[in-house]
Image: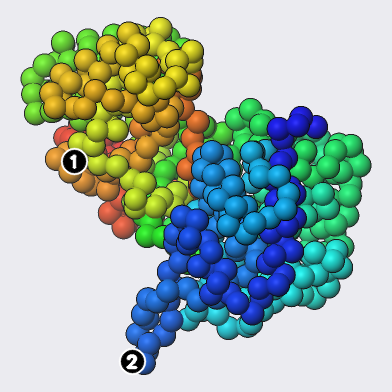
Amino acid sequence: MASNQFTWIETYREITTWLLSHKNNQKFLISTLKSIGIDGFRDFREGSTKSIEEFELDEIDPFSFFCYLNKYKLDSKRVELLQTLHKKLDLKCISPTDVSGLPTSNPLKVRLFPFKYLRTNNEIDNLWKLFEQAVKQNIDNLLFQTVLKIKGVGKGKLSISLFYVNPEKYLSLDSRSISYLQNLKIKPFDYNTIGEYLAICNRVIITCNQMPYQISLDAWNSKSDKIHSFNEEMTSKIGSVRTLIDILDKQDNDFEENVSVFYRGHSNGSFKLEPSIYRNHDLIKNEDKLFKEMIARSPNDFKECNTTFEKLVKMQHYSLPTRLLDITSNPLVALFFACSDEKQQSEDGRLFRFEIKDDDIKYYDGDTISVVANISRRPHKFTIKEIKSLRNSTFNNKEEIQYLLHEIRSEKPHFSPVIDSKHLEMVFCVRPKLDNPRIIRQEGAFFIFGIDDDKSKCAKFEFQYKSFIINKSEKAKILKQLDILGINESTLFPEIEHVAKHLKDKYF
């Protein structure tokens, strides 16, 4: 074990002991989290007039306490919070310097219990009892199964929570770890009792000859394209519009933050969540040429586009490969795209559901979006690999960044000459300007992808999602059902050639 790895374990052990002594002072636990800079403590209860009213959360369980500490994506942020808490609690162990192998929690659904008006069965009290038993390593199966049934828990979330309590005993069976272990030919991972869960933990520990925290680190460092944090593929297949509506109706809307929900449909379930410009090496190699030649050959079509992002949207409209990925707020539109490709009728499709904090959604005219969009105008050799860790002022004075700043200033003359290197390696959700009939009809938005070190690789997609398999044998039936509901090629693509094609297909 490297001396700078797993320094968080001793801190978590002391926090666990501290939590045990504060079961009857839960408001203090919440205030402690607030005092170190953590937010998101909204709760809802039934008011005197039977309406639902918002109030400040006043009770919490210890598992959720740990989840709040891990709801931020950046490891540096989590380390900072943990160090601040370490100092505030005056813990005896050495202050932590890393969070290696420590899974993050879903920032949209941090807590292991529902809102107050939905709490019906001593959920928080049962979570405290399970926590106490987990510390003693003597978990009662009936209690374990009761907690599993709490709205908002689930097996993956509970296994992560147990891992927080004792990362030397309990294995985190989040989707990333399961995918990693499956790649090592270790399976199955289904369990319904505490005995079955512990048997899996013991089998994996013996097979890998590693502690759970080491296994978790290896899983989260894995480069497998199939691995995504908090991403869950639902096992039931969608065979009709009604099935989809029923499934979405059952989705947990107990969000910790204000969120927007988007969807995307893939006609082939094996297709990756990546923009079209990255689906072929020659395309990304010539991205800057594609961008410039498209405008040079059709200048009148881009007269009304004020920014590079708006130009990319129009290029996407005309099917030119870009670094944008289409999404929609209408699940039926996504379902149409999952079923409509005639070349993929023999393949199961997939529908993705994304839950995104409103604060994380950008707009078409935002400075950050200008930064990422203008990467498309830089040549293939553009890279930040050797300079991204430099101080901000030094980074922005580098020649390649100066050229990028020049591109941005061409559309935004008053743009502050400062680029955050982290933004260049991120994916952002963007609401476009609703000036395009197709975007309006499709209720569209976009993900825009930055780079990963250089232009040859796109930024890692880190948004959480759920995905649903679309039954290939039911695609034709689903399209007919969607047509009855007014979702078809002529309504989603209002251009006359698409209307003509739809009518031809319908009557001939």
Between disc 2 and disc 1, whose residue precedes?
2
Residue furthest right in the image: 206
Label 2: element kind: loop
The amino acid on which the numbered mark 2 sits, given as a three-letter code, is: Thr
Spot occupied by residue 9 in the image (x, y as percentages of width and height): 73, 47
- Residue in view at x 75 percent, y 32 percent: 3
Which colour style is shown?
A: rainbow
Spot occupied by residue 448 in the image (x, y as percentages of width and height): 35, 32
- Residue 433's disc is 1
- Residue for badge 2: 49
The amino acid on which the numbered mark 1 sits, given as a three-letter code, is: Lys
- Within 10 Å of disc 2 (Cα), the crowding (few <14, some 14-19, many 20+) is few
- Residue in view at x 21 percent, y 27 percent: 416
- Residue in view at x 37 percent, y 37 percent: 428
Front residue of this view, candidates 504 and 466: 466
Spot occupied by residue 85 in the image (x, y as percentages of width and height): 58, 54
